[in-house]
Image (cartoon, rainbow, N blue to C red):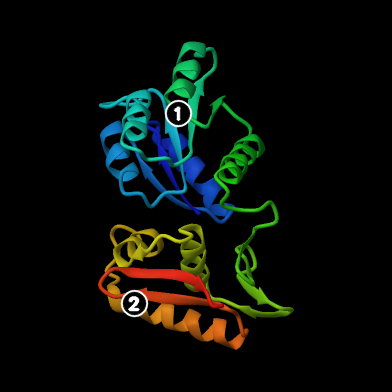
Amino acid sequence: MRILIVEDEAHLAEALAQILQKHHYFVDVVHDGSSGLDYARSGIYDLLLLDIMLPGISGLALLQTIRKEGISTPVILLTARGETSDKVSGLDYGADDYIAKPFVTEELLARIRAALRRKGEVMPDHTIQYGDIELNTATLKLSCHGKEIKLILKESELLQLLIMRKQAVTPKEMIIEKIWGFDSEAEHNNVEVYVSFLRKKLVHLNSAVGINTIRGVGYVLEVKA
């Protein structure tokens, strides 16, 4: 799961990033609303942690903009205690939740898990299912009909992304941004290599799930009849 933190307090943003990375989330951090809006529009994030008071575009304005543009990424607002009107406005604009600063780490993590569950992206035990396969994103184990195989990290991330996209075709550019990151030098052939690895492991498990290539576009999972 990739989370975007939009927080102008650098020390708090860094602390949040370290906490989330320790719990196996991938994290990007920006410190102003304009950058936050640009990053949010990329569509690669599973959740946004959004401070309300930001330089440039405010957190509420950012939230209102992405919702008007049809971006449904879950958003948790970071608020100061007593900002009742901002909390109400945030929820009215489409925020999924809010948490007041300073907050307890365990509460923040619980709210993140809840927001992701409401989106239907991850089960409490870190497993996701598609067809006859089950992927444990914590142990990186892929299982099917009682057999299991260990994936490497990028294989797990790629399969998870394809599962989350459901029947939508996933372009190679999105895979690179989501798994390797904006600043990566990864190319299309890197994606093709990992798709090939995954296909071989699905065959090894005798799974009915396959990765279908949509020529010139990307990939989509399918369940063979």
- Could you tell me which secondary element the residue under label 2 belongs to? helix
User: Which residue occupies 34% across, 26% down?
Assistant: 54
Look at mark 2 in the image and give the residue it sits on: 190
Q: In the drawing, what numbered circle is on residue 126?
A: none
Q: Nearer the viewer, residue 144 or 87?
A: 144
In this image, 119 relative to 7: left or right? Answer: right
C-beta proximity under 8 Å, tags 1 and 2: no
Mark 2 Cα-neighbour bin, 10 Å: few <14, some 14–19, many ≥20: few
The answer to whether 148 is drawn above or below residue 71 in the figure is below
In this image, 84 relative to 59: left or right? Answer: right
**Which quadrant holds the C terminus?**
bottom right
Q: Which of 52 and 121 is in front in this view?
A: 121
User: Which residue occupies 47% across, 48% down?
Assistant: 46
Q: Which residue lies furthest to the right in this view?
A: 146
In the rendered structure, which amino acid carries the disc numbered 1? Gly
In this image, 34 relative to 195: left or right? Answer: left
Mark 1 Cα-neighbour bin, 10 Å: few <14, some 14–19, many ≥20: some
> Which of the two marks, 1 or 2, is nearer to us in this view?
1
**Res 128 quadrant in image:** bottom right
In the rendered structure, which amino acid carries the disc numbered 2? Asn
User: Which residue occupies 30% across, 57% down?
Assistant: 182
Q: In the drawing, what numbered circle is on residue 94?
A: 1
**Res 48 quadrant in image:** top left
* Number of numbered discs: 2
The answer to whether 13 is drawn above or below residue 212 in the figure is above
In this image, 163 relative to 45: left or right? Answer: right
**Res 38 quadrant in image:** top left
- Residue 198 location in percent, x, y? 49, 79
- Residue 40 location in percent, x, y? 34, 42
- Residue 135 location in percent, x, y? 62, 67
Q: Earlier in the sequence, mark 1 or mark 2?
A: 1
- Residue 57 location in percent, x, y? 28, 27
